[in-house]
Amino acid sequence: MAITNPKLFGLNVLSFLSDVLDKNEALIALNLPPLDLNVIRGSSNAGATRGDWISLSRLSLPIYKTLDRFRLDALTYQGILDLRSGTDRTLFGNLNINGIISGNAIRYRYVDGTGASATVKIADISTSRVSAWSSSASPVTATSPISYGAQVKIRSGGALQFGTQSGTTGPRLQTTITPQAKEFASEFPTSKISCTIGGSTVVLYAMKGIPIIFTGFFRNLDANITLTSLISSTPASWKIVEVANSNNFVNFPNRGGTTSSINFRSSVSRERYIQFYYNPDNIATVTITSANISFLPAVKLQNATGLNFSSNQFRNFPDVNFIAPSIVSLNLSNNYFYQSDTENERKLNSNIVNKIPTTLKELYLGNTFYGSITQNIIANRFTGLTVLHLGRDRGAYFHPDDADTNCELPNVPNTCETYLVNGNDFRAFGTTASGSGRFNVQDLTNLITLNIGGNYYLSGAFSIAATNNKIQAIYSDGTGLTLPTGLAGKNSFTTLGHSYARNAGPLIVSGNYLYEACNSLNTLSLYASNVTGALPKFTNTALSYLDLRYTNLTGGDPSGDTSFVIPERTFEKCTNLVYMLLQSGNLLTTPIHPNSFSYTPNLYYLWYSSSGRTTGSIPSLTACKNLTNLYLYYNNFTGTMPSLAANPNIHYVEVSYNALSGGIPAFKNLSNLYYLFMYNNQFTSLNKFQNLPNLTYFYAHNNKMTGEIPTFADCPNLYYLILFNNQFTDYKTGGFSVNYRLTYLDLSGNLLTQQAVNQIITDLYANYNAVKRGGVTVNLRGNAIPSGDALEYVEILRSKGWSVVFN
């Protein structure tokens, strides 16, 4: 049966059946009698169709059904095998196949022997009619190379001495059958081969491990390898070769110095070799990510300290002890080790960590395993670990199982500075083993960055070691933990992310602000957390970002004074505050102190919403010269709207759903003002805007404005103008005649006279004639009916693609 792709298995009845010498035998094997085919052959030339043969008495089955069955079977097997077997992995699991299955290189496991002496071995399917596919390795492992008809011979009386790069006796030297010419300047000899020829000893020089070959499947590739030093000042070279066509390659000669990088780009994805030409002993770090590499070549990188093969297709955990015995940093995150061929290596257990040298200091294994982790295996193995990164954003994650129903966070040595386990399902902190070097994360004294967010069931009290004066950032979002304690007075502390934390609790405990005198704290993000109680007096002089939206804060002074929901000196020391965002449905029904924001000259974004509870006037914002976004939606503010003349950078204003009254100010000279939302208040008039060149959205519906609609000639970029449900009776002539970008105008539900409506339509008609365009909507329902020329103008505008409606 024809196999058009060495990694696709099954039948292809549309191809010529030419794998066997006797085609008739092949047809009989498919239950297609040659005599039947001889009858059918050429019948289409006589006008016959497939339907003519379905009921032919001489055929026991309609041929098209037989072929369809073979085709569907082939697709089924192909789908299974694509996912579960191939030259790069072992076929395992309970797989039932009815019928014939063909493959040119399928690796599988089998049991050799019986009883106590039985062992599990790995073998290859041998089905080729020319020669068997097999591996010359002994024993065969899941990553052993498969050879096709290879032969290795040593003449009688000859001997070979195989040496490592350092010259000592070591592993077998693997060579290719066909000699390859030296192609790049970086191909220096690494080894000597001593052989006896005709009674004389001859020494040959060889390049062991050059090139280092990685096999991947990719379209684009960014790869980087650093070297400990250069040989004779010669840089490294690379080569990208298409597996199916060795003549299709790209060379990257003499790339960089001690840092060698390539950027390969192609229009299609292909299986390709990544070949690196340099002495393996000189390699310091390797970074090849997102290349669909499934295994590492059997090359020892004696002096390598860093390997980064994240986001590839590894399933079997490599023997890092052999590959990089001096490794310091290992990044194998976003791989598929939970699908390992070896059952007891599908979890992060001792079988896995024992494959990694104890020299390791940085371990990155997020999105790689399911299940729990034995709490102390990491601390026991890597006593100098500084980085543990098990963070997950997709794929496999750690969770409770039969081995550990609590799924405790793994302990680490006290050298750990970065601890990231976010996005998993860890549920408990566990305990520190006293005097053993196994530390619970809360007891680490050298910890700098901690991320335990996204572990939803991780709950309870949470603290940082009192003796830890290095902590900088804590992320505990999406957990059931309380706000972290033990941080007051720590000047190193800069960032707290505790959003979506359902049991956060108060910021003030026993009269003390939890983060008192944390002078470096610049980010306090508590969005959508159950933060309760009064507002502290924030003493964090570096605080620039404060997010208290969707919390349950009540506000008021820590002393119990409820006169103001935000007391005057709440932000007195926060002169660097840029973002202040506060939203809660439990806030006091008292005002914000008028001077609350007099101490925040750098305020850029102010968001305050109280579900209609906070009363009083909008506080003074004259000190906030950099204010750009003002969001005061859904409160109960009364009094007049400030003119914002002291805020020249203002861009977005949202004061809807309040009880503001008086006239909408004559906003002027605000060149950055883009959005102005003032609907659902009690405004009684609208003043003329002046020099607002970028105002695009103005919504002021559902108010009580009377009198005349002013001109908007000073708002040339006005796009949406929404003034429905007011009490306007008149219109300033020429008010809309030069607003050439106006697309949506809603004046419905007012008291505009017929004269005012006629003038509005006349101005809009002049507007159209100046800049002809369609797609404009005008709503005049609920006002007087236009008359005379205005009706004719309406018809003309409608014919040009405008929507103009009135009663």
Image: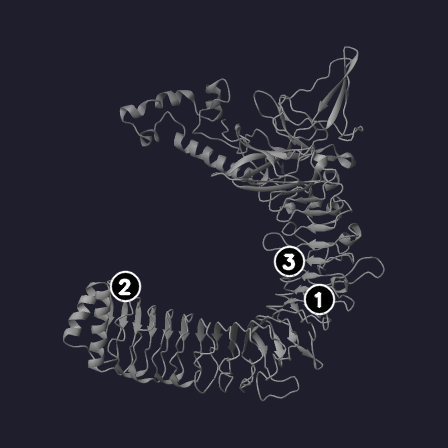
Residue 140 vs 725, above or below: the answer is: above
In the rendered image, residue 667, in percent from the top left (x then y), is placed at 39, 78
Give the camera-side residue of 181 and 806. Answer: 181
In the rendered image of this protein, does residue 678 appear above or below residue 194?
below
Residue 775: which numbered mark, if any? 2
In the picture, residue 82 is in which quadrant? top right
Residue 637, image x, y percentages? 47, 84
* Mark 1, other Cα within 10 Å: few <14 / some 14–19 / many ≥20: some
The picture places residue 209, in percent across and down from the top left corner, at 69, 31
Q: Which mark is residue 424?
A: 3
Is label 1 or label 2 in front?
Answer: 1
Q: Amino acid at mark 1?
A: Ser
Q: Is residue 639 above or below residue 422?
A: below
Q: Which residue corresponds to the image point at 51% horizontal and 72% vertical from the top-left?
A: 626
- Residue farthest to the top, as pictured: 198
Q: CA distance from mark 3 to mark 2?
A: 50 Å
Q: Are marks 3 and 2 in contact (CB under 8 Å)?
A: no
- Horizontally, residue 732 falls left or right of residue 128, namely left
Front residue of 581/81: it is 581
- The reply to whether discs 1 and 2 touch (Cβ–Cβ < 8 Å) is no
The quadrant holding residue 467 is bottom right
Q: Nearer the viewer, mark 3 or mark 1?
A: 1
Q: Is residue 488 left or right of residue 794?
A: right
Residue 806 seen from this side: no
Q: Which residue is mark 1?
A: 492
Callout 2 amino acid: Gly
